[in-house]
Image (cartoon, helix red, strand yellow):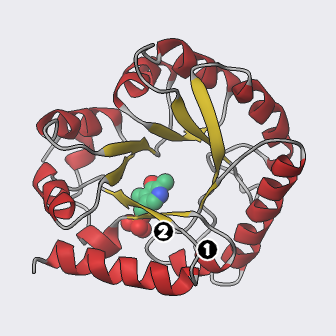
Amino acid sequence: MTTIAANLQASLARIEAAAGGRKVRLVAVSKGQSAASIRGAHAAGQHVFGENYLQEALAKIVQLKDLALEWHFIGPLQSNKTAAIAQHFDWVQSVEREKIAQRLNDARPEQRFPLHICLQVNIGNEASKHGLSPNAVLPLAQAVRALPRLKLRGLMAIPEPDAVLAPLRFKQLRVLFDELNNEGFELDTLSMGMSDDFETAIACGSTMVRIGTAIFGPRVPGRAVGLQ
Ligand SMILES: *Cc1c(COP(=O)(O)O)cnc(C)c1O
């Protein structure tokens, strides 16, 4: 068995043990990894991949066109990238502004299913962090719900890597998720948990974990900007 296949199997076993019978989806985060590595993970049974940088992702999406993969955009969004993202991805997990949501909606091709969306929440209200402040989530959720080419699926967050604070943040995101559903939303995706904290996130209610290095090993620096 290859290292990637063994790592994938080990991650899936840990997810299953932490989930205790609940269904938790795995997004294999492939930023900084080669198309060959993604192909290896696919051969080992993984179909869902996450990327942060458009140029890097597009190169790999083209090289892997022969595979039936589900692509999640999980990185920072810029207005001038929204059209390509709406055309080439299945999910966008990092929506934090109405203007960006509108642009994704407008660029989503008619012949494809509506783009699946998560709102990224800065759940700890940290300075210099991406994501909406928690009290801005409801109005953006309402705006996204009104856009026909988008389908709001849930919330995503990346809490500070702190063993004490992270569980608190995961629970706060879960509370916000439940509040939206009590307001009549039908969200099914709570995207939280990465290589170092996914079991904690699952214990706090995560339905989708985003795991990179635990599957693929260290990222190649520079690949993201096309240097390698
Ligand atoms: C890079 C990244 C991950 C994966 O991080 P690992 O620590 O390698 O598992 C998950 N989510 C987002 C948004 C990321 O940018």
- At label 2, the amino acid type is Met
- At label 1, the amino acid type is Ala
Mark 1–mark 2 Cα distance, whole angstroms, equals: 8 Å
Quarter occupied by residue 119: top right
Q: Is residue 66 left or right of residue 102?
A: left
Q: Give the residue number, with chain letter if any, for mark 2.
A: 194
Q: Is residue 95 left or right of residue 31?
A: right
Ligand 1 is in which quadrant of the figure?
A: bottom left
- Vertical arrangement, residue 116 with respect to residue 170, above or below: above
Q: Is residue 162 visible?
A: no
Category of crowding for the residue at label 1, using alpha-carbon neighbours closer than 10 angstroms: few (below 14), some (14–19), many (at least 20)? many
Of mark 1 and mark 2, the one earlier in the sequence is 2
Residue 76 percent coordinates (x, y): 50, 39
Q: Is residue 106 visible?
A: yes
Q: Is residue 52 left or right of residue 169?
A: left
Q: Which mark is residue 56?
A: none
Q: Give the residue number, with chain letter if any, for mark 1.
A: 201
Distance from mark 1 CB to nearest ligand 1 atom below 8 Å: no
